[in-house]
Amino acid sequence: MDNKLPKVVAAFWVMKIAATTLGETAGDLLSMTMKVGYGLSSMILVSMFLVSLVAQLATRRYIPFLYWTVILTTSTAGTTMSDYMDRTLELGYAKGSALLITLLLGTLATWRFTTGSLSVDDVRTRKSELFYWIAILFSNTLGTAFGDYLADSSGLGFAGGAALVGSLLVVVLALTFFTKLSRVALFWFAFVLTRPFGATLGDVLTKPRDKGGLAFGTLGSSAILFTVLIVLVVMATMKQAKAAGVRPKTESV
């Protein structure tokens, strides 16, 4: 198979933040605004994730629309799953985050032991890709719990939480350019951090002004973010098609 994942460049991180922020607002739209509840919302969204994942695993190349659909479904499912664990099951943000960190580290360790590498630059087997998506689901769920902790329990508030995580992402970016630290480790650290950044940014967009938000609401914020993500996916699809069109043809022997 061709590499099933997009290249990790600046556009990737912009789309990741847009998708995870949309996952936060869309998950809250379903579970809270529409009053579906955390448990039922999680069942619905996990089902959507599984359907999109099966379609993604069945392909043999990177398809931007399909890939980012799976990212979005992991993000929305992660939002409601985290809320269900922290609020309905009353685990709290600390216990919920500790459990999710354990699951994420266990997934990464099993992936490394089974395949020999955690690199996302050359995922060409379904086994590696399956580990990749499991790790993403846990990382997005963990990011929601951590983002909620920063926004609700740390005293930083929504904007303060977003500023803190944004600063940590800048540090990771600097470490990537100016040090020889493991690029794989830095990738996963940044991947986890973009989720709480999206969660706190989503809260900034949705919450009322008296609570430090911009008062766009879950519906308005979701519509804005969905439009942004669609535009970016269309651009990525056009770029992918152009690259495929200029790919040199090999002569048959």
Image: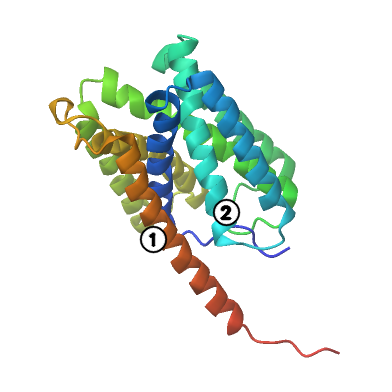
Q: Residues within 10 Å of mark 2 (few under 14, many from 20)?
A: some
Residue 138 drawn above or below residue 220: above
Locate residue 86 relative to residue 124 in the image: left or right.
left
Q: Residue at x 67, y 42 (%)?
A: 51
Label placed on residue 67: 2
Q: Foreground residue, 76 or 178?
A: 76
The answer to whether the residue labelled 2 contacts the one labelled 1, judged by CB atoms less than 8 Å apart, is no
Q: Position of residue 101 (x, y in %)?
A: 51, 26
Q: Residue at x 39, y 24 (%)?
A: 32
Q: Residue at x 74, y 53 (%)?
A: 58
Residue 33 drawn above or below residue 6: above
Disc with the residue nearer the chain's start (2 vs 1): 1
Q: Foreground residue, 83 or 221?
A: 221
Please, what is the three-letter code of the amino acid marked with disc 1? Ala
Please, what is the three-letter code of the amino acid marked with disc 2? Tyr
Q: Quadrant of residue 35?
A: top left
